[in-house]
Image (cartoon, coloured by chain):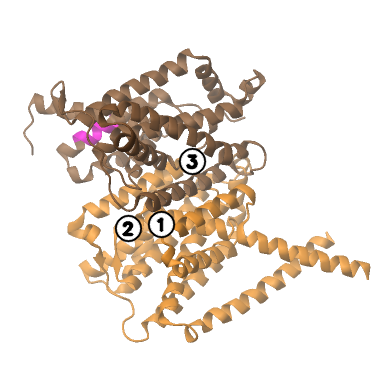
Chain colours: A brown, B orange
Amino acid sequence: MVTIDSTLLSQYIISGVVIGLIYSLMAMGITFIYGIMRIINWSMGEFYMIGGYLQYIIITHLLGVEDWYLGVLLSMVGVFLLGMVVQGLLIKPMFQGSVERRTEYATIVTISLGVLFTNVAVIGAGPFIYSPPGYYHGTRIITLPVSGTRFVAFIGTIVLLSLFYLFLKKTWWGRAFQGAAQNRMGIQTAGIDVFRLDQIAFGIGVALAAAAGALLAPEFYLHPRCGSIATMKGFEIIVIGGLGSIPGVLCAGLLLGLIESLGAVFLNPSFRDVYGFLFLLAILAIRPTGLFEERERVA
Amino acid sequence: MKEISYTKITGFKWYSLSIAALLLLVALLPFSTGQYYLQVFTVAFYYVILASSWNLLAGYTGQFSLAHHAFAAIGGYTSALLVTNFGLPIWLGILAAPLSSALMGFILGMLCLRMRAIYLAIATWAFAESVRITISMTYEITRGDLGLAVPKLFVGKGQGVAYYYLFLGLAAVTVLMIMFIIRSKMGYYLRAIRNDEMVARVMGINTTRWKILAFMLSSGIAGIAGAFYGHYNGLLTPVMIDFNEMAFIVIMVVIGGIRSIAGPLIGAILIELLTETFREFGEIRMVVFALAVIAIARLYNEGAMGTIRQFTQWISRRKQAREGVN
């Protein structure tokens, strides 16, 4: 048993909060796409990976490391555009009557898309592991010494999530998205082009994943399958928090981070990636619809 | 009415004839091909089992499990660990494999299948990753990423042929069993659940129970397949639970034709053969497969089997039209 004093405990808690919030970025992307289109994008991890690679190319070949924040923005924009194209080509047709089973179609297409991107990355970048230089020198958050990258990722996540929240609450587009999440038919009768909305939502969702990939690239390294752990956390978070719920994502993300961090200390650090899944099972057993239930509308 | 029964009979004749011819061809194959392709076909039959059982769950019942490969691995590891650690005979280990996979399936199903179908997909995705991590991390027991050496089922000179017939038999039994299930009352329940779960429930079908049963059944089949695969391959590693493996099963089912009995069979054999034949192309194969799946899902939902079916229907319609003129 580890002896615990208050400083150590506060460090574990802060490290859990930091990592949990970073995971939430990915989960926010998944839940946003689900909220608008009622599909799960299974290739989220691949968009995360693409974001990381774009960031690597941008900061090592075009800009310098000191302009990493520009790199993050540029890779988000790049993945946003890629997401718009992908949505226009593959996801949009499923709402236009030519596809019989939407969930099945979306699952198959996005899984294949993931396979496609992963293997293109293997062909393009080779089976090597890339590691961009760190963005910032090591520092501390209250009592916890952290690596510069993790600090930057933490701050970057807070900034991005706040901007996203303001976007949803304050702008016309944000209100349109809320409307679409509540009732697609209703928003169409209000004269909003819901297909355009879908396309932008998909772009924003995958751009959030790309931001996570770009921010975490120096910390977790880049390889064609580097997104899989982050995606797993993202999926766990959205089920724990309740599908389609935005406050649920934040709460579940923080809880997941805390449980992992404390589980790693008090139980066994090797299994830290499994605790989240056990927590998910516990939540499903106690409260099947997640912490923040978003009631399903059956029309 | 007349037309329907007519196409049904020709369809049946065509089916049984082609299946008989195919079976003969497949049964005689070991005498005409080398060791290498014998192994390729053995692995292809393993994938036939996985693809068909996944099709029962995802295609016919509409419940997407994304941990089918993990259930195979659980079966494989269960049998291997029982045999190596407790000295059980291999056959007993293989018998235990489907029990442990189906038990896992039962627990997961109990927790997820009360809700929307998407929960199962997400939970099984996380489950597969967790199983992979657990197996890599418990290296004292499973030897982690080094891989677990598994005693072989057959040893000696004729083992290639023996394994070939073993997996052929397993695949045939699986496909026949699934065909039987789909044509039984249970098959109607499962398809009713896929078509409209709410209506199925209103009609008095206990949808949760049937979904859990289908999930346990398909996971159990994957477990048996995995156990036999372990004792055939002689080595089990966590790579077996890589998501690529699951994507491979999806690719096979969709290219062969989802929601048909012969589709996963054709798809698995075709994809495995193509993968082995074009080995020097490396990752390009997977890119091509992924594009093919996207094209099929996007443009034409029924895969290779749907094309064949349409073709035979076209022929029978032509024949009918000609007879009508005469």
Which numbered marker is on residue B245?
Answer: 1
Disc 1 vs disc 2: Cβ atoms closer than 8 Å?
A: yes
Q: Position of residue A21 (x, y in %)?
A: 30, 27
Instruction: In this rendered view, identify the residue nearer to me: B136 or B52.
Output: B136
Mark 2 nearby-residue class (10 Å; few <14, some 14–19, many ≥20): some
What amino acid is at disc 3?
Ile
Predominant secondary structure in magenta? helix
Q: Is residue B218 visible in this depiction of the protein?
A: no
- Viewer-nearest of discs 2 and 3: 2
The reply to whether the magenta stretch includes residue B253 is no
Tag 1 subunit: B
Residue A20 to residue A229: above or below: above
Tag 2 residue? B239
Residue A210 to residue B166: above or below: above
The reply to whether the magenta stretch includes residue A259 is yes
Tag 3 residue? B118
Labels 2 and 3: the sequence-earlier one: 3
Inter-mark Cα distance, 2 to 3: 26 Å
Indicate left or right for A97 with B90 as reference.
right
Inter-mark Cα distance, 1 to 2: 8 Å
Q: Residue sitting at 58 percent across and 62 percent down?
A: B263
Disc 2 vs disc 3: Cβ atoms closer than 8 Å?
A: no
Secondary structure under tag 3 reads: helix
What amino acid is at disc 1?
Glu
Labels 1 and 2: the sequence-earlier one: 2
Q: Position of residue B321 (x, y in %)?
A: 87, 65
Say yes or no: labels 2 and 3 on the same chain. Answer: yes
